[in-house]
Every structure is written in C-alpha cells, then in structure tokens.
Image (spheres, rainbow, N blue to C red):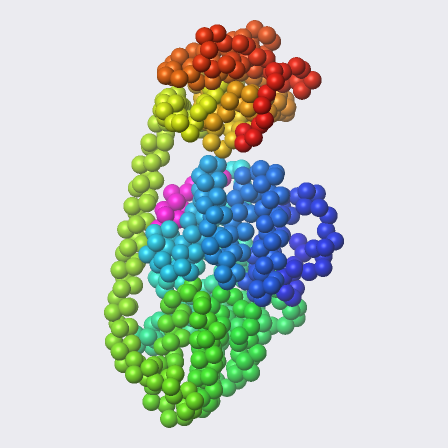
C-alpha cells in the first residue's frame, strides 16, 4: 500500500485510474490513509480529504457491499469530526451509518457509530449525552460475538479495536481516565496478534496522550507522585513508538525521529523531566499541524521547560498564545482546564511576569485559590461519571437483550426476515396509514424449489432460501417489507407504490434471482402475484388475492409476475411481466423512488 509523506493528498491522485476500476481493498486502504493524513493537515488539505472520502463513499454505495459501505460512512464522518467547523455535517452520516449497520446486523460498526456520535456531542458541549452514547456502544461490544466467519479473524479484530478506540477517545476527552484505560487495554488486546505498524503506533500514541492528560489531572488534586509515574510511563512508550511510527500510515519525514515530528511524543519526554534541552524541539513543534489536543500538551511541556530554565515570562507567553489559538476547541474540556490551571500556577505570585501580561493574568491569580478548592470536588465527580457510565452500560445491555428476545419472536430464524406474525402487524399498520397508500402487496413463490430438496438435501434448500431472501431484500427499496410467509413463499409490501411501479421493482427482483450463480440458486426462479390493497380490505383478503395471482403466474410458466392493476374495481385484470427483458409487459408508470 502506498504511504503518504508530507501533507495529505499528492500528485498521484491526479494520475490514478477511475475509482470503479479499483478493488474494495484499495478503497478501504485509501480511506485509512486519508484518515491518518487529515489529523495532521491544515484546513485546506482537510477539506480536500473530506471531498475525496465522499467520492470513495459514493463508489462504495454504488457497489453495495454492506461492510464496505459502513466503513466508508465511518471514514467520511470521522474526517468531518476532525475538521474544525464540520461537526454538524458528520451527524447525518452517522445517522445513516446507524441505520445501515442495524439493517445489516453489523454490530461492531454499529457500536462505532454510537461512539462517533458521542465524539460529536462532546464538541458541542453535551457531555452527559456523550456518556450515554458510549454506554450504548460498550453494551453492544460487550455482547458482540467473538468473530464473524464472513469477515475473517483479522478484519473482525481490526473493527473491534477501531470501535473500542473511538469509545476511548470520548472517555479520554471527558477525563474519565480509569474507564478509558480499561477500554484502550481491551482495544490493544483485540489486535495484539494481528496489528500492523500503523495500529501499534496509533494505540501507543493514544495511550501516551491519555497518560499525559491523566498525569496533569492528578497534579490538579495534589497527587504529584502518581502524576510523575504517569509521565514516566508515557515517556517509555514514546521510545517504543519510534520503530512502528517509521512504518505507519501517518504523514512523516523519512529518516527523522518521531519525537522530532510529533509534538505529543516530544511533550511526553519533556513532562517526564522538564529541562532546557527540550526547548528548541518543542518550539519547532508548537502551534503546528498536530493531532487533536496535541498543541495544548506541547504548550504545557514547553512552558514547564522554560520555567525550569528561569524564563517564566516566556512560559506565560506560550500558554497565553495557546489559550487564544485553542479558544474555539471544545472537544476536550479536561485538557483546556489543564491549560488554565497551568496559567494560574505560573501566574500566581511570579514576580518575573511582564506588566503587559498583568491585566490578563490578574483574574487567574485571584481565582487560583478558588480553583484549587474546586479541584477536589471535580475529582470526586469523576467517580459519579464512572458509576453513571457503568449503570447506563448495563441498562443498554439489558435493553438490547430484551429487544433481541422480542425481535426473535417476530423474525424467521432461517432467513432473518420478518415472520408471519410480524408481517400481519406491519400490513395492518400500513393499511391504516394514509402515507403508505397506494399499498402494493406481492406473494412470491419459488419455481423448482421442490426439486432442490429432492435432488440435493433440505440443508441445500435452506441455503437457497437464505440466498433468495437476501437477494429480494437488496433488490428493493429500504422501506419495502420482505417477509417469509411460510415454506418457500415470501410476501412483499411496497408502501406508496402503485401496481405499475411495483411491477417494475419486482421485475428487477425476478431478474436478480434468475441471474444468481447456479451453485447458489440451483436454478430456482420466482412466480409473483401482485395486487393493490383495496379500501377497507382485510389482510387475509388481500393476501388471498395475491395468492390467486401468484398461481396465475405459475400456470403461465413461472419466472414472471401476474398483476392486478385496478384496485377498487370488481374484477381484476391480469398483467404479465416476464423476467426476460425481450418479453412483452404491460404499460407501467415511472419507477420513481422504487
């Protein structure tokens, strides 16, 4: 895989073949590169990354592979969460990701969508709501299976680690470090056997960031010895990050040590042992293109090194400049408090502070004692946050269990489609809804299915039913209902579709099944009876008419639709639509929205 060097997009993007010629693996790999790049790019480059990821998402949606679509939805959303001023644009993408992952049973990516929503809520100051989203995400991850045979172990582990890492980001932003430590340790555990250099680098950097924030937080309540231990552990991890960073996807200068390129890593060494030797390096890295919240950590580390060298006035200037430049960033409240506390600590009673700074520092000096008193109370509140997280996590887990039991009662265990009971409820609901009218109802029977059971086995027949069910679901609109009626029969409800539009939609479904590979379908085709719900008609009546129409399609050879296009009349008029595109078919209206 090609790695990015420098800032984000490059000239190679202009010379690539069309996206349609690239593999799914390439699309996903390119998205990972761009997410790594967007974190260390200026706004102009970030906007280019967002645009490119949108193009990748559009191509993924055209292909329709559910996991790929979910991962590209995630990438497009993350790029907006990282780019300042674009958080609101991430919300509809995350809503779509949640609906998509729920529809396709992608539990890990569904949990990730909740975690990313929490990330957006933190930025907008809704910290309690963010905690609820993380509780939902963790509850889903707690109940997730160990692996998915379709994805493979490595891909499953990577998705699990990614979802846990996104949960960790929010917990770290909120300063709930004990819970964050548990989650990031679990993320590391998920990929310990299969992680590449990029995953290792990402996890190490995240743990370093957490340890530095945790250490600063401990200092605020006077637990300096524990804080020092956190700083020293972070420094040891910084040394361990050098080798994998050189092979990661992060933009970097080849041959240059990581601590000379990444402010976070330079800050960890400086906070472990503040000294003049770090000043020049930190000056070069301060205020640059850093990872989220890196600039505050660099500023605090630089200020401490300057103060240790007797240059307190310069230290104050660094902190004040950072306070101004980071004023609009609300994504990590605890880190901003660390910056203010550092200003109060240096500004209180320092005779060397220049007069020009006095007016701005006066409030900090006056509030220093008051802030110290508040810290103890804030520290105790973190225990309440952890308890809240655990309570909500358990509540979400139990709610999910209850919902799963309810869903099982309404779901066909073989195909995972709604069962007869769920169909009856949905049909009654749609029949009573004005917005669902006209409501087309189709009864579908498999041609040649008995031969599959007789010539092969009932297990093979079950596989055919599953394949046909999945094909029908994918060929229709998102709000159409496909249910298993019994045996080899299915019922399809098409709300808001007249018979003409429903005929076109079902013709696509017939062709999709007829074109399945022989080893999957064993040659089965569909006979479809299509009717439109009449005013005041009961469910059993409309299904009886659809069943009669289906037998007309059977008598005419199958692999076609027999439709009744005149709802409300005394006599139905049959219409025939064959799967062969050369066959004649009744005149149909436009296929808009179907």
Quarter holding the N terminus is bottom right
Determine the image quadrant of residue 406.
top left
Name the residue nearer the viewer: 462 or 106. Answer: 106
Number of marks in the image? 0
Q: Is residue 452 visible?
A: no
Percent from the top left, x then y, of residue 547? 47, 11
Determine the image quadrant of residue 364.
bottom left
Which residue ends up furthest to the bottom in the rendered image? 351
Would residue 231 appear left or right of 581 to someone viewing this image? left
Judge whether 213 appears above or below 542 on screen: below
Write the residue at 26% across / 60% down: 384
Q: What stretch is highlighted in magenta?
A: 135-148
Write the residue at 54% across / 32% down: 593
Percent from the top left, x then y, of residue 561? 56, 15
Name the residue nearer the viewer: 74 or 199. Answer: 74
Write the residue at 52% across / 44% down: 70
Would residue 71 appear left or right of 14 to someone viewing this image? left
Q: Can residue 494 be seen in this view?
A: yes
Determine the image quadrant of residue 454.
top right
Judge whether 558 appears above or below 104 on screen: above
Judge whether 552 appears above or below 249 on screen: above
Which residue ends up furthest to the front in the rendered image? 569
Write the residue at 39% across / 45% down: 140
Percent from the top left, x then y, of residue 347? 37, 85
Q: Does the magenta stretch include residue 203?
A: no
Judge whether 115 appears above or below 280 on screen: above
Quarter holding the C terminus is top right
Q: Is residue 143 magenta?
A: yes
Percent from the top left, x then y, of residue 431? 39, 23
């Amino acid at each position: 895989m090609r790695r990015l060097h420098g800032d984000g997009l490059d000239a190679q993007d202009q010379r690539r073949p069309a996206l349609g010629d690239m593999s799914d693996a390439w699309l996903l790999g390119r998205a990972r590169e761009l997410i790594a790049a967007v974190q260390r790019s200026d706004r102009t480059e970030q906007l280019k990354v967002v645009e490119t990821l949108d193009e990748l998402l559009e191509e993924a949606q055209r292909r329709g592979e559910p996991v790929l679509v979910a991962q590209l939805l995630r990438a497009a959303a993350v790029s907006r969460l990282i780019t300042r001023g674009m958080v609101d644009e991430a919300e509809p993408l995350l809503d779509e990701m949640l609906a998509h992952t729920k529809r396709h049973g992608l539990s890990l990516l569904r949990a990730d969508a909740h975690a990313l929503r929490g990330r957006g809520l933190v930025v907008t100051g809704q910290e309690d709501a963010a905690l609820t989203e993380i509780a939902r995400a963790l509850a889903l991850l707690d109940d997730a299976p160990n692996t998915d045979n379709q994805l493979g172990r490595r891909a499953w582990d990577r998705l699990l680690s990614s979802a846990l890492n996104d949960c960790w980001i929010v917990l770290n932003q909120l300063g709930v470090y004990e819970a964050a430590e548990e989650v990031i340790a679990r993320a590391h555990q998920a990929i310990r056997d299969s992680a590449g250099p990029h995953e290792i680098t990402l996890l190490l950097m995240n743990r370093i960031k957490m340890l530095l924030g945790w250490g600063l937080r401990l200092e605020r309540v006077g637990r300096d010895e524990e804080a020092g231990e956190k700083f020293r552990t972070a420094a040891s991890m910084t040394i361990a990050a050098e080798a994998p960073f050189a092979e990661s996807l992060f933009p970097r200068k080849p041959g240059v040590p990581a601590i000379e390129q990444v402010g976070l890593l330079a800050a960890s060494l400086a906070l472990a042992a503040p000294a003049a030797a770090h000043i020049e390096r930190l000056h070069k890295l301060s205020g640059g293109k850093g990872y989220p919240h890196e600039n505050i950590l660099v500023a605090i580390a630089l200020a401490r090194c300057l103060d240790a060298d007797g240059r307190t006035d310069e230290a104050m200037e660094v902190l004040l400049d950072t306070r101004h430049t980071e004023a609009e960033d609300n994504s990590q409240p605890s880190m901003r408090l660390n910056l203010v506390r550092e200003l109060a600590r240096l500004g209180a009673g320092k005779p060397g502070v220049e007069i020009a700074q006095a007016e701005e520092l006066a409030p900090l000096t006056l509030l220093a004692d008051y802030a110290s008193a508040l810290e103890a109370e804030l520290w105790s509140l973190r225990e309440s946050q952890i308890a809240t997280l655990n309570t909500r996590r358990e509540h979400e887990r139990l709610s999910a269990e209850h919902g799963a039991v309810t869903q099982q009662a309404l779901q066909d265990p073989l195909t995972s489609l709604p069962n007869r009971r769920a169909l009856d409820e949905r049909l009654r609901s749609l029949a009573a809804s004005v917005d669902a009218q006209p409501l087309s109802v189709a009864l579908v029977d498999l041609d040649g299915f008995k031969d599959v059971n007789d010539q092969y086995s009932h297990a093979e027949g079950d596989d055919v039913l599953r394949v046909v069910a999945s094909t029908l679901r994918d060929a229709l609109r998102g709000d159409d209902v496909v249910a298993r009626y019994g045996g080899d029969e299915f019922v399809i409800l098409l709300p808001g579709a007249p018979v003409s539009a429903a005929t076109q939609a079902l013709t696509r479904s017939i062709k999709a099944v007829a074109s399945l590979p022989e080893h999957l379908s064993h040659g089965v085709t569909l006979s479809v009876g299509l009717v439109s719900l009449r005013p005041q008609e009961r469910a059993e009546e409309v299904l009886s008419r659809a069943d009669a129409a289906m037998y007309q399609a059977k008598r005419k050879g199958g692999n076609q639709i027999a439709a009744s296009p005149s709802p409300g009349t005394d006599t139905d008029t049959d219409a025939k639509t064959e799967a062969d595109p050369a066959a004649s078919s009744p005149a149909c209206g436009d296929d808009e929205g179907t």
